[in-house]
C-alpha cells in the first residue's frame, strides 16, 4: 500500500544530508532527552552514540554517514579511546528520533531501507509517545540480523504484546518498504506495499507519537543473542515519510530526492499508472508491462521492483485474460547502461477451490523503449509469487 491520495504528507526525510538536533534546531535527535550523552541498557551490548557529545564526537566513534541520498547507521566494536566514556559497552550503535521536531496521532508511516545482517543485532523503525509514557510502543519493523528473512511487527500495550512474525525476502540484501497504517480502531502493517499483519489498536495508543530509527546489539539473554567479537553491520535508510488521515493537518513540502547509486529511489519514478500515462522522465528508459487477470472476489494487484528496489505503488489489473484483453502499465526510470533485474510480484492471490474461483495474474508481454523483451509472454504467476526477468538499458546520451 502507498498512502492514499487523500492523505496529507506531513513528514518527508530523503537524507540528502543529516540534520541533527542540538536542542535549538534540527530534525533528528541522536539521544533521548533523559540521556543526552547517549544510552545503553541491560538488554543491549551497544551504546547508542551521540556524536554531539565530546567523548563520542571523534571520527572513530561516529556511526552515522550519508551518501547518495542514503543514511547509514553502523554497528561496530567500540574503539579503546572511548570505551570508558560509554561504560565499557563492547559495541557502538545509533538511534535517531524526531521527539523534538515531529510527532503525530494516527497516520501512515513508511521507511525504505536495507537492514543489517549483523548477527546479534537489530535494525528497527518504531514509534514512542511524545509525552514520555510507556506503554504504548509501536514497532513498525524489527529485523534480527542473524535471521534476516523474518520480520517482527509489534504493538506494545498494557494488555501485553503478541508479535507478528512475517517471512520476507532477505531484508539485508535489498531496499524494501516497511510501513504501518495507524488508525483509531486498527493497526495494519505493510511490507513492500503488501499487507502482512493487522490487529486492533490498543486503547492507550491514542496520543501523539514520534519516530525512531535505530540499530542495537543484543546480549546472550536477549531475543537476538549476543554478537561475535568484532561484528560489524549497518542499517541503510533511503527515506522516511509520514502521512496524516486528518484533512486539516499541516502539509509538509516534499523534499528533493537524491537517488542512491546502487538503489534507485522509488520516489524518483513518476508517471506510474495505466495506459493513459503519456509523459516520461527526461533521459529515462520506458519499461512497459502488459498484464491481465482472472478476477475473483476482487482484481489482481502487483508491485514491480528494479534491481531489488520497489518502484512506486502497487497497481491494480482489470483486463480479463479470458476475454483476450490486456492492460499496459508504463514505468519511466533512469537506468545505467547494462542489464537490470525486473521483478513483478503478485500481491493478493485468492483461491476458492475451483478453476472458476481463482484469482490469477498474467504477464502478457514487456518492452523497453518500444523493443519487446524476449521470452516474456503469457506468464502465469503462481500464488503470491514473483516473476523475474532481465532487461538491457543503453547508455544515456
Image (tube, rainbow, N blue to C red):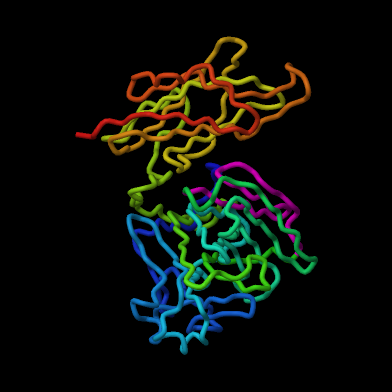
Q: Where's residue 108, x and y in %?
A: 58, 52
Rendered location of residue 390, percent (x, y): 41, 30
Stretch of the chain drawn in magenta: 175-203
User: Which residue in the rendered view is the most extreme toward the left?
Assistant: 397
Relative vertical location of residue 271 with respect to residue 72 in this rendering, above or below? above
* Quadrant placement of the C terminus: top left
Q: Which residue is at the front of the view, 78 or 19?
A: 78
Q: Quadrant of residue 45?
A: bottom right
Q: Nearer the viewer, residue 253 or 158?
A: 158
Residue 318 visible from this viewpoint: no
Q: Per the image, is 296 magenta?
A: no
Report which quarter residue 147 is drawn in. Answer: bottom right
Q: Position of residue 153 (x, y in %)?
A: 66, 56
Q: Which residue is nearer to you in this view: 322 or 208?
A: 322
Outermost residue, top direction?
323
Q: In the displayed structure, does residue 306 sit left or right of residue 319?
A: left
Would residue 176 be counted in the magenta stretch? yes
Furthest residue in direction bottom, as rendered? 84
Residue 105: give x, y in percent of width and height: 62, 61
Q: Residue at x 64, y 50 (%)?
A: 189
Tell me if residue 334 can be seen: yes
Outermost residue on the right side: it is: 159
| Residue at image location 52% in from the left, 42% down from the top | 5
Amino acid at each position: 500500500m502507498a498512502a492514499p491520495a487523500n492523505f496529507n504528507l506531513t513528514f518527508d526525510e530523503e537524507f540528502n544530508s543529516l540534520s541533527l538536533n542540538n536542542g535549538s534546531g534540527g530534525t533528528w535527535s541522536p539521544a533521548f532527552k533523559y540521556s543526552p550523552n547517549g544510552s545503553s541498557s541491560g538488554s543491549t551490548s551497544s551504546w547508542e552514540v551521540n556524536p554531539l557529545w565530546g567523548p563520542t564526537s571523534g571520527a572513530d566513534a561516529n556511526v552515522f554517514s550519508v551518501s547518495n541520498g542514503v543514511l547509514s547507521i553502523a554497528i561496530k566494536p567500540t574503539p579503546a579511546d572511548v570505551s570508558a566514556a560509554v561504560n565499557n559497552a563492547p559495541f557502538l550503535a545509533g538511534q535517531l528520533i524526531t521527539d523534538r521536531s515531529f510527532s503525530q496521532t494516527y497516520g501512515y508511516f513508511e521507511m525504505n531501507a536495507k537492514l543489517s545482517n549483523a548477527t546479534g543485532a537489530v535494525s528497527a523503525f518504531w514509534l514512542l509517545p511524545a509525552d514520555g509514557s510507556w506503554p504504548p510502543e509501536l514497532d513498525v519493523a524489527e529485523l534480527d540480523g542473524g535471521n534476516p528473512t523474518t520480520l517482527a511487527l509489534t504493538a506494545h500495550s498494557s494488555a501485553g504484546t503478541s508479535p507478528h512474525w512475517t517471512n520476507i525476502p532477505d531484508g539485508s540484501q535489498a531496499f524494501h518498504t516497511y510501513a504501518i497504517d495507524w488508525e483509531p480502531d486498527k493497526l495494519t502493517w505493510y511490507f513492500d506495499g503488501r499487507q502482512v499483519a493487522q490487529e486492533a489498536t490498543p486503547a492507550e495508543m491514542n496520543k501523539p507519537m514520534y519516530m525512531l530509527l535505530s540499530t542495537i546489539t543484543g546480549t546472550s539473554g536477549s531475543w537476538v543473542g549476543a554478537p561475535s567479537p568484532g561484528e560489524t553491520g549497518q542499517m541503510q535508510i533511503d527515506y522516511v515519510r509520514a502521512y496524516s488521515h486528518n484533512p486539516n493537518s499541516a502539509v509538509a513540502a516534499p523534499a528533493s530526492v537524491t537517488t542512491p547509486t546502487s538503489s534507485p529511489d522509488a520516489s524518483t519514478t513518476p508517471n506510474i499508472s495505466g495506459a493513459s500515462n503519456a509523459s516520461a522522465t527526461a533521459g529515462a528508459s520506458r519499461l512497459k508491462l502488459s498484464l491481465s487477470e482472472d478476477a475473483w472476489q476482487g482484481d489482481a494487484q502487483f508491485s514491480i521492483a528494479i534491481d531489488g528496489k520497489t518502484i512506486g505503488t502497487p497497481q491494480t489489473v482489470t483486463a480479463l485474460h479470458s476475454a483476450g484483453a490486456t492492460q499496459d502499465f508504463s514505468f519511466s526510470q533512469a537506468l545505467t547502461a547494462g542489464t537490470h533485474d525486473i521483478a513483478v510480484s503478485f500481491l493478493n492471490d485468492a483461491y476458492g477451490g475451483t478453476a472458476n474461483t481463482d484469482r490469477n495474474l498474467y504477464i502478457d508481454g514487456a518492452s523497453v523503449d518500444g523493443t519487446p523483451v524476449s521470452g516474456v509472454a503469457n506468464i502465469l504467476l503462481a500464488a503470491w509469487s514473483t516473476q523475474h526477468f532481465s532487461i538491457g538499458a543503453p547508455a544515456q546520451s
